[in-house]
Amino acid sequence: MTDFLIATNNSHKVEEFKRILNPLGINVLSAKEAGVDLGEVLENGTNFAENANIKALSAYKISSMPTIADDSGLCVDALGGAPGLYTARYGGEGLTQTERNALLLKNLESVTKENRTARFVCSICCIIDEDNVIEVEGICEGYIANSPSGTDGFGYDPVFLYKDGRCFGQIIGEEKDIVSHRGVALRKLKEALEIRKDVL
């Protein structure tokens, strides 16, 4: 299997990457598993794709390994697209994810269901080498629920209501991979990597 560095220390993301890419013969390694210190990366892009590229390029230069990075977030129409690029820092530093979810619901408490439309966006940048860079994006449309549901998933999953009526916090593993923004993006990446097997 070919080792690929995933430029994240988020164990939940690593598991999602492994489920989809391992069957392709790709051994997904977190920065910790690869023994790589990614350091602090200034994510100053203007969109998810630019931030994914910044993270992937930084990790590739540090590790000299084929590298995959993603930047993803939740965009809520009634909040002008927020949290957006600041999804992980919504409400400021120091808040727990439970507190961020509560803040999001509070900011939407006067908004009717039909106006609580939202989407998860995931941009992925894969750098195999300097001549082979793949960029893909996945989007999952839904709504923000009135209250959290479920104990699975992570981040805003308990408050993101998918079109089948369940929150992502109620959908697990491979089932979530089929519909989630990251699952969609990873399948696109998988298809692109299958075409480029000669450089793996």
Image (cartoon, rainbow, N blue to C red):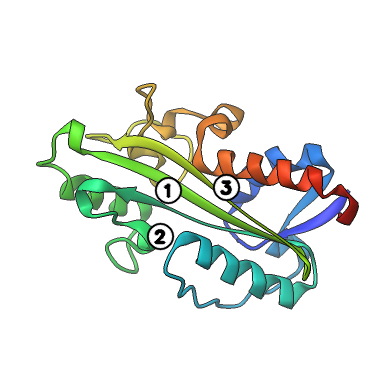
Q: CA distance from mark 3 to mark 2?
A: 14 Å
The residue indicated by pointer 1 is 155
* 1 and 3 marks in contact (CB < 8 Å): yes
Quadrant housing residue 66: bottom right
Q: Secondary structure at mark 2?
A: helix
Q: Position of residue 172 (x, y in %)?
A: 53, 30
Residue 108 appears left or right of 95: left
Q: Nearer the viewer, residue 151 or 1?
A: 1
Can residue 41 be seen from the camera position used here?
A: yes
Q: Position of residue 186 (x, y in %)?
A: 63, 44
* Relative to 165, residue 88 above or below: below
* Relative to 32, residue 26 above or below: above
Quadrant holding the C terminus: bottom right
Can residue 98 be seen from the camera position used here?
A: no
Q: Which mark is residue 12?
A: 3
Q: Which mark is residue 88?
A: 2
Quadrant housing residue 20: top right
Q: CA distance from mark 1 to mark 3?
A: 10 Å
Which amino acid, mark 2? Ala
In terms of sequence position, does the residue under pointer 1 or pointer 2 come before the other?
Answer: 2
Q: Residue furthest top?
A: 164
In terms of sequence position, does the residue under pointer 1 or pointer 3 come before the other?
Answer: 3
* 1 and 2 marks in contact (CB < 8 Å): yes
* Relative to 114, residue 53 above or below: below
Q: How many marks?
A: 3
Which amino acid, mark 1? Gly
Residue 63 appears left or right of 172: right
